Image: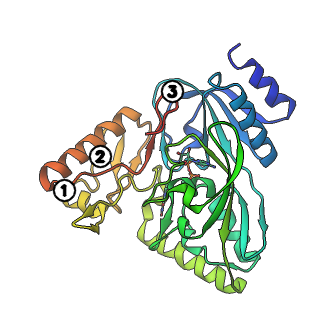
């Protein structure tokens, strides 16, 4: 059987895995077909071992690692990929105001931990779904700040299966991007700079952000992958993709099994059973109109996955 050896490896370690199964429950937008295998990893040591195993069987098991699946969309057809769902969860305080955070830690769990442990300086991340590893890979941010500003270094597994420490520059961070977003390397741990802050003040700063998001992005509870397009740079100035899409008349539009949110026009919502083809068709319409009517090239922020596991 195709996955027999890998299955034995996982069973020997008691690692949860599912063969030929739907990727939808692991993605916030819930768009995609079945994949060859889903492996859910909770322990850092298991993640490291598995990645080394997969590299040693190079090419035999094409794989892709996801965190919260809140920024990705899969193809409708079967893909024989091994998809690793990273749920590693350890956080530890290091020296010199640095936290060591497993890449599978959810941002919501990190915020809770920070409140309990008097850790300030990360509240701008509050409310972003997904894991810290995913956030580092896409340079997630909000309220004018991005994770790149507080990331000191990371422990990674390279394309050749080597485990090593890299510094902030290695990521080549740009707006909502790093070399990990479309790359093959995996982040195991990230090391974040923090400031000391009273627990009550940390809590207040986090709650402030959560309330703002609730009031300004009420569509957040729907099935989406966050902002669909990057904010375009026009005449050297970052402008709102949402406002542009609204001006083009798309806000609230229903398209096949998708809806452009009536609250925030840069959110594309799966209203039930939407396909990858639906999304691509909608994207083409919006991109086409933005270019024809305004001469603006809109770029996608969400990540598409090819059946072979290529991110684009
Ligand atoms: C309602 C909603 C609101 C959102 N708001 C924001 C926002 O305010 N700001 C913002 O920036 N984004 C936002 N997003 C987008 C998304 O939540 C973030 O980009 C998030 O940081 C992605 O994390 P994830 O763990 O879900 O990554 P995933 O979607 O699982 O993966 C994203 C990419 O990162 C890679 N990746 C994941 N983990 C690792 C790892 N350990 N090592 C290497 N590569 C890895 C994946 O392979 C993939 O290429 C929002 C999304 C939703 C649905």
CB of mark 3 near ligand 1 (< 8 Å): no
Badge 3 element: loop
| Scheme by which the image is coloured | rainbow
Q: Is residue 5 above or below residue 42?
A: above
Residue 261 shows which numbered tag?
none
| Image coordinates for residue 266, horizontal then vertical, percent | 34, 57
Q: Earlier in the sequence, mark 2 or mark 1?
A: 1
- In the picture, the disc for residue 308 is 3
Q: Residue at x 72, y 83 (%)?
A: 199
Q: CA distance from mark 1 to mark 3?
A: 35 Å
Q: Is residue 129 visible?
A: no
Q: Which residue is mark 1?
A: 248
Q: Residue 115: give x, y in percent of width and height.
A: 71, 76
3D distance between C-alphas at marks 2 and 1: 14 Å
CB atoms at circles 3 and 2 under 8 Å apart? no
Which quarter of the rendered picture does the C terminus lie within?
Answer: top left
Q: Position of residue 60 (x, y in %)?
A: 65, 21
Label 3 vs 2, first from the N-terminus: 2
- Residue at the extreme left: 293
Q: Residues within 10 Å of mark 1 (few under 14, many from 20)?
A: some
At horizontal 36% and vertical 43% (from top left) the residue drawn is: 258
């Amino acid at each position: 059987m195709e996955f027999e050896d890998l299955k034995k490896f996982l069973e020997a370690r008691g690692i949860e895995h599912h063969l030929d199964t739907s990727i939808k429950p692991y993605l916030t937008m819930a768009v995609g077909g079945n994949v060859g295998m889903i492996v859910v990893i909770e322990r850092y040591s298991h993640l490291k071992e598995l990645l080394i195993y997969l590299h040693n069987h190079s090419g035999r098991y094409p794989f892709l690692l996801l965190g919260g699946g809140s920024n990705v969309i899969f193809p409708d057809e079967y893909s024989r990929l091994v998809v690793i769902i990273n749920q590693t969860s350890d956080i530890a305080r290091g020296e010199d105001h640095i936290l060591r955070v497993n890449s599978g830690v959810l941002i919501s769990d990190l915020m809770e931990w920070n409140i309990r442990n008097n850790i300030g300086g990360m509240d701008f991340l509050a409310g972003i779904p997904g894991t810290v590893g995913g956030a580092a890979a896409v340079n997630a941010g909000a309220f004018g700040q991005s994770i790149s500003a507080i990331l000191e270094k990371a422990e990674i597994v390279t394309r050749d299966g080597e485990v090593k420490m890299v510094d902030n520059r290695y990521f080549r961070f740009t707006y909502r991007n790093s070399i990990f977003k479309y790359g093959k390397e995996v982040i195991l741990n990230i090391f974040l700079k923090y400031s000391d802050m009273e627990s009550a003040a940390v809590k207040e700063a986090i709650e402030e952000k959560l309330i703002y998001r609730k009031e300004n992005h009420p569509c957040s509870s729907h099935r989406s992958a966050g902002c669909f397009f990057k904010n375009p740079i026009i005449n050297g100035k970052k402008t709102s993709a949402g406002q542009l899409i609204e001006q083009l008349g798309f806000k609230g539009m229903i398209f096949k099994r998708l809806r452009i949110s009536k609250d925030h026009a840069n959110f594309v919502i799966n209203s039930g059973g939407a396909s990858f083809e639906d999304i691509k068709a909608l994207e083409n319409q919006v991109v086409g109109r933005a270019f024809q009517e305004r001469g603006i090239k809109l770029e996608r922020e969400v990540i598409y996955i090819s059946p072979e596991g290529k991110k684009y």
